[in-house]
Image (spheres, rainbow, N blue to C red):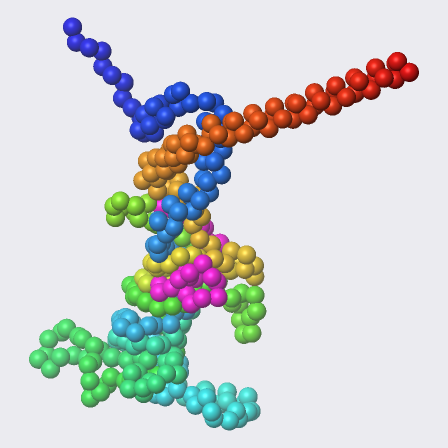
Amino acid sequence: MSSPPTPRRGGHGLPNALLSGQLADRPIGQILLALAATLAALPLILQLLTWSLERPYAFYINANSETLRLTIQENAAASWFIANALIRERAETLPDPTAPIILHDSQTELQKTQATPSQPFRGCLEIGPHAEVTLHRQGSGALMVSVEGLPIERRQATPAVILRPLITPAHGTADTQCAHSHAQGMQTLQRITLEATIGEQPLNGTLRGRGRIGGDPYFSTLAQSPPLLRGGEVIAMGRRLFSERAYTLMEAPLHLGDTLSVLDSPKPEDESALVTCLFSVAGGETELGGIELSCHANGQALSILRYGDRSRDSLAPRPWDVLINEPSMQVVLPLAITGLFVFALRLLDGCYPGLCRRLGRARKGSMGNKSEEREEDDRGNETEKGG
């Protein structure tokens, strides 16, 4: 006859097997004392396990925002094709910070602005490194693109933006391409403001830099409604301890008026992390307004400014999130706790008998002192009765 099948052990089979041989022939007091020591050391175990898993988390951001501001870093140039735009402002050099401030009459400035008509542009917009880029679109209106170079060394040699208009190749084909030389109309600028009209085809592009998603609707200095982040979601992903597979650590919703940035460290005053954003601006005939964003960043925490409240700065995955959602912790954590408990039992094997003897002697001594006090009291009572 075949033997009956043995029951399978669950996920806690190995810890149970370790404990079954350790609890036999041990006093209940020793077991309780080892359990108390294990519970006291449990926060240290959790801290060590969390520290071993701590690494830059991957934050995935999906949002609809009316504004995006990023500072482009080294080796992070970007190029977009813009089908229909107007150049509102342009400058080949940055303003001199040492120049004196000269106040002009507002009417004179208005007439000067009206006398300079906006120039149409259709072609490739190339953004260089060390430039601050701001995308601004409210509702289903035009997209405002502002690029300004940072005042760094060799700024004149590295333009903040290059305009490459469309040209027709000399061989006479119908294909068009963007200009690649100044003779073909290419312009190198340090500042520019474009107003892009979105047609049937959406305007898509990428940006990589440090900055924030969403505006600041609390202290508006312009005579217009401030741009807002409309909504979205942030998902923090981690990687398993023994493999490169990802798992979800934390989800944070984004609400109307939020301002979001990813931090390199849990300290809010530190520099923000590099964010790579894919943006898409659809035409006015669609229901989607603003700018659709899909961003990715590696960092330690989030900074979400909500309604002027900075209490959500440094919003990071908690140790408990890591321990619960990390699949490897379902095996490592029970084994770690069991190992510590067994270690405490073994450690008490040598000192627990001596501790019991000391407690017994102290108890006997206290009982002897009490009996002597009782005998003295009895003798005193007998003396009083004899008197």
The residue depicted at 47 percent of the width and 91 percent of the height is: 98
Horizontal and vertical percent position of residue 206? 30, 65
On the picture, is 114 further left or further right than 79?
right
Vertical comparison of 163 with 387: above or below? below
Q: Residue furthest right?
A: 387
Horizontal and vertical percent position of residue 356? 51, 27
Vertical comparison of 15 with 279: above or below? above
Part of the protein shown in magenta: 248-275
Horizontal and vertical percent position of residue 344? 42, 34
On the picture, is 6 further left or further right than 318?
left
Which quadrant of the view contains residue 327? top left
Q: Residue furthest left?
A: 171
Quadrant of the rendering where the N terminus is positioned: top left
Along the line of sight, the residue nearer the viewer: 24 or 249: 24
Along the line of sight, the residue nearer the viewer: 306 or 39: 39
Determine if residue 295 is in view.
Answer: no
Along the line of sight, the residue nearer the viewer: 156 or 352: 352
Q: Residue furthest top?
A: 1
Determine if residue 44 is in view.
Answer: yes
